[in-house]
Image: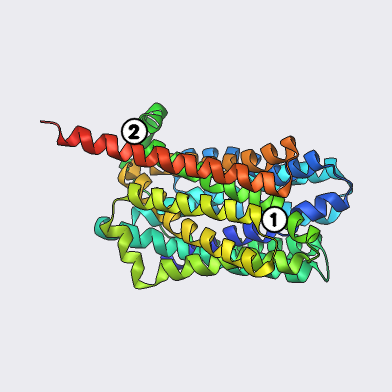
């Protein structure tokens, strides 16, 4: 059962990452302006936010099974609509529906995985789930970049839709006999106050880490494909660049170094990860040679590999099973908001490639510095008599 949920996680993120090399060029091919292109990239994540929150509430009340089924089937249908996009406005509508429906899937899946992780190994457990995200980051952009150069974005999205339908049918038979949530936990969830999530320091840090992780992803989704094309390369090169950070991340997730996530405080690995991502963005703003672009994406992969398990560990440590669905719902809502903020802000400011990457790098390094200062303050408070 657990292995099948990992497969669902993989294909959910596969769909996300396969969009990265192709969505902004696809929007431009439909006549979108720079702002409309940024909005089209971010619209998926905007509606995904709504789906994430609804998924969290429903998961705590009913368990993930129904939510996963509805999300998989509805995502499959929405992905077929891309073949009928005729202009920027219709693309925005399709992106909204797609993002909302797919937003139902991931919080339910991660709640199931978190509730079954041993406390002493929760760091390695989230690293393994991160490995499936990393595999999606490797395969998704490379696949879509290569195939789209010969076919087009609608073909990629239709293929993803067929995969979602297959997963939905398989989930009906594999997961329907599994009771994910005990009744007493559901009853407890009904009386949970949402404001608790936004008062707990660990939860706030997990939400902030999720936001800034995907803020940088939104910038990459918008700016990197356009920079690569301006340098004279095609979507295949963009896909391979985006896959590079996934390769690096998955090696860290699966090799023995993943024990670090059980031995080192999540705040430390969080600060390190977001620092590496910030430096990679500054590097991307300066380089124009393909070899150096690959190096920059490798640095980004190191940062991603340290940040993703850190924020998941903070969330698990700061929540209990009866409201973990809501926690993951808001957690992945901040993922989605981050992509919207990153792509929309850069599109609205109409920054150059250099300016977009530099701004993102400065923001990420500032967050890392704030995190380090917060750790120092907490250490001083614990040392006081």
Q: Quick check: 373 left or right of 98?
A: left
Q: Quadrant of the N terminus?
A: bottom left
The one nearer the camera, 22 or 237, is 237
User: Measuring 40% from the left and 57% from the top, which residue is drawn there?
Assistant: 113
Is residue 332 at all visible to an observer of this figure? no
Question: Which comes before the other along the chain, label 1 or label 2?
Answer: 2
- Separation of disc 1 and disc 2 at Cα? 36 Å
Which type of secondary structure does the marked residue at label 2 adopt? loop
The one nearer the camera, 273 or 95, is 273
User: Measuring 41% from the left and 29% from the top, which residue is drawn there?
Assistant: 194
Disc 2: which residue: 200
User: Measuring 40% from the left and 36% from the top, which residue is drawn there?
Assistant: 204
Q: Quick check: 71 left or right of 189?
A: right
Q: Nearer the viewer, mark 1 or mark 2?
A: 1
Instruction: Determine the image quadrant of residue 190.
Output: top left
Instruction: Determine the image quadrant of residue 170.
Output: bottom right
Disc 1: which residue: 224
Q: Residue furthest front?
A: 286
The one nearer the camera, 165 or 49, is 49
The spot of residue 212 in percent (x, y) is 52, 43
**Mark 1 surroundings: few (<14), some (14-19) or many (≥20) residues within 10 A:** many
Is 82 located above or below residue 255 in the figure? above
């Amino acid at each position: 059962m657990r292995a099948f949920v990992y497969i669902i996680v993989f294909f959910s993120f596969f769909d996300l990452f396969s969009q990265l090399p192709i969505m902004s060029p696809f929007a431009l091919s439909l006549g979108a302006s720079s702002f409309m292109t940024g909005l089209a990239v971010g619209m998926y994540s905007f509606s995904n936010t709504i789906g994430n929150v609804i998924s969290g509430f429903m998961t705590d009340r009913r368990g993930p099974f129904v939510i996963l089924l509805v999300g998989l089937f509805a995502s499959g249908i929405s992905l077929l609509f891309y073949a009928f996009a005729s202009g920027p406005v219709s693309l925005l509508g399709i992106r909204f529906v797609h993002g909302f429906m797919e937003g139902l899937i991931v919080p339910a899946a991660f709640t199931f995985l978190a509730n079954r992780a041993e406390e002493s190994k929760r760091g390695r457990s989230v690293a393994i789930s991160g490995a499936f995200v990393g595999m999606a980051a490797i395969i998704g952009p490379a696949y879509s970049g290569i195939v789209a150069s010969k076919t087009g974005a609608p073909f990629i999205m239709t293929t993803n839709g067929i995969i979602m339908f297959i997963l939905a049918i398989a989930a009906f038979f594999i997961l329907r006999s599994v009771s994910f949530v005990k009744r007493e936990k559901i009853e407890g969830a009904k009386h949970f106050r949402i404001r608790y999530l936004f008062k707990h320091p660990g939860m706030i840090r997990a939400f902030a880490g999720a936001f800034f992780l995907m803020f940088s992803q939104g910038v990459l989704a918008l700016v990197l494909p356009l920079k690569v094309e301006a340098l004279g390369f095609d979507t295949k090169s963009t896909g391979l660049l985006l896959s590079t950070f996934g390769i690096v991340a998955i090696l860290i997730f699966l090799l023995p170094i993943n024990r670090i996530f059980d031995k080192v405080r999540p705040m430390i690995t969080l600060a390190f990860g977001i620092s590496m991502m910030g430096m990679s963005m500054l590097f991307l703003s300066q380089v124009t040679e393909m070899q150096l672009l690959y190096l920059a994406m490798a640095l980004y992969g190191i940062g991603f590999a340290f940040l993703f398990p850190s924020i998941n560990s903070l969330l698990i440590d700061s929540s209990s099973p009866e409201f973990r669905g809501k926690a993951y719902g808001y957690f992945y809502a901040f993922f989605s908001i981050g992509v919207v903020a990153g792509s929309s802000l850069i599109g609205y400011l109409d920054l150059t490639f250099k300016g977009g990457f530099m701004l993102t790098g400065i923001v990420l390094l500032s967050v890392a510095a704030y995190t380090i200062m917060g750790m120092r303050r907490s250490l001083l408070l614990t040392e006081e008599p």
